[in-house]
Image (tube, coloured by chain):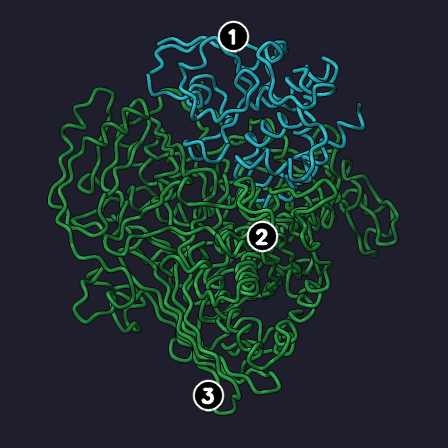
Chain colours: A cyan, B green
């Protein structure tokens, strides 16, 4: 089958998709976007977390056919996504600020942003999103294999809960396994990103 | 377009100028947070095929027949290989004993053993083709424990053993046996006022690194192969791969791809030879990526163990003697079992003074999954047992458990059971004091002014308690781990360091074969180069086999040994740079000839701080390039009868205090806090040091309360090869881990540092167990603890 969908703001088309193919496979093997990771491929580890119409999902559990006409954000698009969100009044989704109680992101909000035209291969020189920079600064990256999924999940949490308690952070990231860090530096990174975000407002 | 995901130089420049002792940031950090960092499973090559391994469905069987015809007939299949297709007489590999078949020959010895391999143009085609290979097995009885392995009529797991351990083991199904006898434990036992005996069981733990085994083999025009792979030791892989392929080592060019964690599980080969065989057979690049299910079969695990301990103490609390037998199950192939036996036996008394000991450790051959290296390596199992013993003895003597440990703690100068003196600081009592002095988390921590937060209670959002039936417990433990490869191993490393001027700036390039598996070795190498060479800009060359061996990224050794090698090569580069400086500028200033000269801030300076020249000017038109091997002081093998010998390089100590809350009705445990105090000698990168301690602590927590590979004792088949059934700690299971870092220099080591990665994995587990015992009053002689052990509703 053929699947048309948007990845990181760009229209994409995948041909000859077989019926058992996952969104994760399409991203990694067809789109050249291996940032979403293949650690368990059964929805237990969260390393493949992407946003599907704004909602964080394990892309290994999403059949490729299900994304027809929908909008996907991966770790490769996270910096852009966060930048555009910031340009939309600090909250691209409209789910934060006065609507702080609302979880997730509406489809309309998620589709508001567009990727920038240039195609960066390395990310060098590009500005990182606040959560990406915080992960580096706090020492939350060791082997880094869980990092992309955690970044997508943490960024989504901070979008609708800009001042999370520790228990909130743990709950929101409980679907993402990390084997290296013992999570303490990940907690630090999310706290740091939240603090920097609130300073910036 | 050729290969994508090929590692390239990582240059870390002006943003971070830190030398050693600073928390500089990872040079690969940006790549890792943007998703651009190329892990071994991200490699891609045009025209590449996908490899798939067919694994045995039974644990112990003769192979009657293998029929590959249907698989070969599948459209899109390029090759199906079995044992008969192996190109040379070398058909086995192994870290120490070459007992592991590349593909099964006549017999399979454990569940999940590779039997055949397939290459196809799509991963699903390869999987389906592998499923069409017909293997007929004639099942054999399975050996699953010490009794069945050493029975007089036991089937031999390996017939015709000719390895160097067969001469001293009491049974061919024992891989290696190491006794350690010092003093006279029987006589000393007569002085004991209290004797405690215990039998302990340690479950099989998995490394559960997140990046599955994977890699890409690309055939090259000269008949060789290029292999991009995630491993812990490139040169060890190379030594095992090349003979099976029938290629000289220089025709197998290995490059390290991004490694998604290791923890010992990548010391042994996994898909390396299989990918190379398929690539050489088909003439096409072949990529193999395990999924999680296969990963559980594709690497060795931590040895499960039975430990039998006896300790005695006088009524004033002094240890009199210790006797123990440690039985490690090595599974079907030897892997690192002999070295694990050496560690378990030589560290069996822990960080305590016991002059009269009688120790025996063995590793079995069985039909259980092969076991080998995992963080802590033999010392973990022993620590679980001796720390349980310490609590029991302290209680019998009537002493505070921490005070009892402090009274018996080893210190600098103490002799190990092997007779080796501990000749660097051993602050065991001090670490216990520090960890005990940390503030306690508040009682009823789940309550706040806003009410109860069930997320902070056992059971969490399952909402199984609001505090009823919840009991707190506190436990302490301390451990000792050796650093580096022991027992006479030539544990060297190699570093190539180049210094030149690029764009008007002095730049150092560090090239080693060290496997960066997440530990931050690349960060530290750049720091060392900055400190030694006074440059801001350091380039880390990808790790490959074009430079000499760096040894393994294991045994807490890389910062010590490859860090030492980088330091040593930098010093040699510095001498050459100064030599050039003297040649070019020596006549301009007498200090060139007389003063102690340093490289700092891109300049040559005297030890008094006077600037003699810019490095950019000294190196104008010249480059200095040095590749040197570096060794720590040698060790010797343990005597096979007495266990005596200076077998270890260095020691690492950590202590933990665990605070747990247990829902005693449901048997649910929540670890509230897991505080650690560790001596690190010198923290080259404090942020990374704390990250290592917290990560190691959490792996110890995992095997205390949840992690265990369950092997069916009737069939020796693995019952939980998935992250659904094999649980590792999530962020909800993991508590706050406050860390107190002590820095007492070891004068034998570069910068006084200690290898740090493993020690926190040792004491974490027994501390959690002690806390659960403290909360419940149960004896709990096995780990991991499951709810039924706490409620008395299930088998032990």
Which is nearer the eye, B30 or B196?
B196
Q: Label 3 lies in what chain?
A: B
Check the image and report above or below for B231 versus A118.
below
Task: Indicate which disc, 3 or 2, sits on the residue closer to the N terminus.
Answer: 3
Residue located 33% across and 41% down the image = B273
How much space separates mark 2 and mark 1, taking CA atoms?
A: 55 Å
> Could one spot residue A120 in this view of the protein?
yes
Asked which secondary structure carries label 1, the reply is strand
Q: What element does badge 2 sit on?
A: loop
> Relative to residue B762, is residue B247 drawn left or right?
left
The residue that label 1 is drawn on is A11
Nearest the viewer among B104 and B375 is B375
Q: Quadrant of residue B775?
A: bottom right
Mark 2 or 1, which is nearer the eye?
Answer: 2
If the image is split into quadrants, where does the C terminus of chain B sit? Answer: bottom left
Q: Residue B497, percent across and down?
A: 62, 44
Left/right placement of residue A198 relative to residue B309 reads right
Disc 3 on helix, strand or loop?
loop
The subunit letter for the residue under badge 2 reads: B
Please determine whether, in this image, residue B314 is positioned above or below residue B68. Answer: below
Q: Label 3 to label 1, Cα distance in Å? A: 78 Å
Q: Is residue B699 above or below residue B759?
A: above
Q: Is residue B639 visible?
A: no
Whole-angstrom CA distance, mark 3 to mark 2, is 51 Å
Q: Answer whether labels 2 and 1 touch (C-beta < 8 Å).
A: no
Horizontal side of B733 relative to B120 (left or right) equals right
Q: Which residue is mark 3?
A: B184
The quarter holding residue B681 reads: bottom right
Label 1 Cα neighbours within 10 Å, binned few <14 / some 14-19 / many ≥20: few
The residue under label 2 is B468
Residues tagged by mark 3 and mark 2 found on one chain of the structure: yes
């Amino acid at each position: 089958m053929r699947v048309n969908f948007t990845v990181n703001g760009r229209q994409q088309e995948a041909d000859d998709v077989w019926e058992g193919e996952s969104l994760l496979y399409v991203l990694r093997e067809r789109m050249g976007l291996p940032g979403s990771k293949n650690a368990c491929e059964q929805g237990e580890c969260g390393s493949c977390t992407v946003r599907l119409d704004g909602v964080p999902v394990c892309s290994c559990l999403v059949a490729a056919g299900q994304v027809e006409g929908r909008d996907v954000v991966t770790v490769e698009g996270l910096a852009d996504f966060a930048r555009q969100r910031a340009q939309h009044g600090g909250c691209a989704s409209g789910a934060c600020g006065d609507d702080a109680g609302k979880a997730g992101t509406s489809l309309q909000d998620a589709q508001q942003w567009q990727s920038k035209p240039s195609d960066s291969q390395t990310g060098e020189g590009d500005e990182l999103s606040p959560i990406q920079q915080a992960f580096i600064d706090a020492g939350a990256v060791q082997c880094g294999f869980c990092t992309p999924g955690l970044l997508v999940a943490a960024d989504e949490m901070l979008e609708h809960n800009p001042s999370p308690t520790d228990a909130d952070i743990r709950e929101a990231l409980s679907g993402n396994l990390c084997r290296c860090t013992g999570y303490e530096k990940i907690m630090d990174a999310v706290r740091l990103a939240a603090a920097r975000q609130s300073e910036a407002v | 377009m050729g290969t994508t995901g090929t590692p390239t130089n990582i240059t870390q420049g002006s943003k971070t100028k830190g030398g050693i002792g600073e928390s500089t940031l990872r040079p690969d950090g940006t790549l890792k947070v943007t998703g651009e960092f190329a892990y071994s499973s991200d490699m891609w090559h045009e025209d590449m095929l996908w490899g798939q391994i067919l694994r045995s469905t039974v644990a112990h069987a003769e192979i009657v027949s293998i029929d590959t015809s249907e698989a070969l007939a599948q459209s899109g299949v390029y090759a199906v290989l079995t044992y008969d297709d192996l190109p040379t007489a070398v058909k086995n590999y192994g870290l120490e004993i070459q007992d592991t078949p590349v593909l099964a020959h006549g017999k399979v010895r454990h569940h999940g053993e590779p039997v055949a391999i397939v290459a196809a143009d799509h991963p699903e085609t390869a999987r389906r083709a592998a499923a069409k290979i017909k293997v007929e097995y004639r099942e054999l009885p399975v050996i699953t424990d010490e009794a069945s392995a050493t029975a007089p009529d036991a089937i031999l797991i390996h017939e015709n053993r000719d390895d160097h351990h067969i001469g001293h083991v009491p049974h061919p199904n024992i891989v290696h046996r190491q006794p350690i006898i010092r003093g006279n434990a029987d006589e000393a036992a007569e002085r004991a006022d209290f004797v405690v005996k215990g039998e302990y069981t340690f479950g099989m733990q998995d490394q559960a690194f997140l990046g599955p085994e994977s890699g890409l083999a690309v055939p090259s025009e000269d008949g060789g192969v290029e292999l991009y792979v995630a491993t812990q030791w490139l040169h060890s892989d190379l030594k095992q791969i090349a003979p099976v392929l029938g290629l000289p080592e220089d025709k197998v060019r290995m490059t390290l791809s991004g490694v998604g964690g290791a923890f010992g599980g990548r010391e042994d080969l996994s898909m390396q030879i299989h990918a190379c065989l398929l690539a050489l057979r088909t003439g096409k690049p072949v990529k193999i990526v395990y999924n999680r299910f296969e990963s559980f079969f594709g690497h060795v695990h931590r040895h499960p163990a039975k430990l039998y301990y006896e300790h005695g103490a006088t009524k004033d609390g002094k240890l009199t003697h210790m006797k123990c037998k440690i039985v490690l199950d090595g599974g079907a192939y030897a892997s690192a079992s002999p070295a694990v036996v050496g560690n378990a036996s030589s560290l069996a008394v822990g960080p305590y003074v016991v002059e009269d000991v009688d120790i025996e450790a063995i590793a079995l051959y069985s039909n259980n999954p092969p076991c080998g290296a995992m963080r802590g390596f033999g010392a973990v199992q022993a620590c679980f047992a001796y720390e349980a013993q310490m609590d029991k003895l302290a209680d019998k003597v009537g002493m505070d458990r921490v005070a009892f440990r402090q009274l018996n703690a080893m210190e600098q100068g103490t002799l190990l059971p092997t007779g080796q003196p501990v000749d660097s600081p051993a602050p065991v009592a001090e670490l216990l004091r520090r960890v005990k002095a940390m503030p306690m988390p508040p009682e009823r921590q789940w309550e706040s002014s806003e009410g109860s937060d069930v997320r902070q209670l056992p059971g969490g959002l399952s909402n199984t308690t609001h505090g009823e039936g919840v009991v707190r417990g506190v436990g302490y433990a301390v451990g000792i781990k050796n650093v580096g490869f022991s027992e006479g191993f030539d544990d060297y490393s190699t570093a190539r360091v180049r210094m030149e001027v690029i764009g008007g700036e002095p730049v150092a390039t560090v090239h080693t074969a060290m496997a960066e598996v997440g530990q931050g070795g690349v960060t530290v190498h750049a720091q060392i180069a900055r400190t030694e060479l006074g440059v801001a800009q350091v380039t880390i060359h990808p790790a490959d086999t074009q430079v000499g061996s760096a040894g393994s990224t294991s045994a807490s050794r890389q910062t010590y040994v490859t860090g030492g090698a980088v330091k040593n090569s930098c010093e040699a580069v510095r001498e050459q740079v100064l030599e050039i400086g003297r040649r070019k500028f020596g006549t301009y200033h007498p200090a060139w000839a007389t003063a102690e000269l340093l490289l700092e801030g891109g300049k040559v300076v005297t030890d008094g701080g006077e600037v003699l020249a810019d490095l950019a000017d000294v190196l104008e038109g010249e480059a200095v390039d040095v590749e040197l091997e570096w060794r720590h002081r040698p060790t010797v093998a343990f005597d096979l009868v007495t266990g005596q010998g200076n077998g270890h390089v260095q020691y690492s100590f950590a202590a933990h205090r665990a605070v747990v809350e247990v829902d005693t009705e449901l048997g649910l445990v929540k670890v509230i806090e897991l505080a650690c105090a560790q001596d690190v000698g010198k923290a080259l990168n404090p942020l990374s040091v704390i990250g290592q301690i917290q990560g190691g602590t959490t792996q110890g927590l995992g095997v205390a309360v949840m992690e265990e590979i369950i092997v069916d004792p009737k069939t020796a088949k693995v019952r939980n090869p998935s992250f659904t059934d094999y649980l590792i700690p999530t962020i909800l299971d993991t508590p706050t881990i406050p860390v107190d870092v002590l820095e007492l220099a070891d004068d034998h080591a570069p910068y006084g540092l200690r290898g740090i990665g493993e020690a926190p994995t040792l004491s974490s587990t027994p501390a959690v167990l002690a806390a659960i015992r403290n909360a419940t009053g149960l004896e709990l002689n096995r780990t991991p603890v499951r709810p039924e052990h706490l409620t008395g509703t299930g088998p032990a």
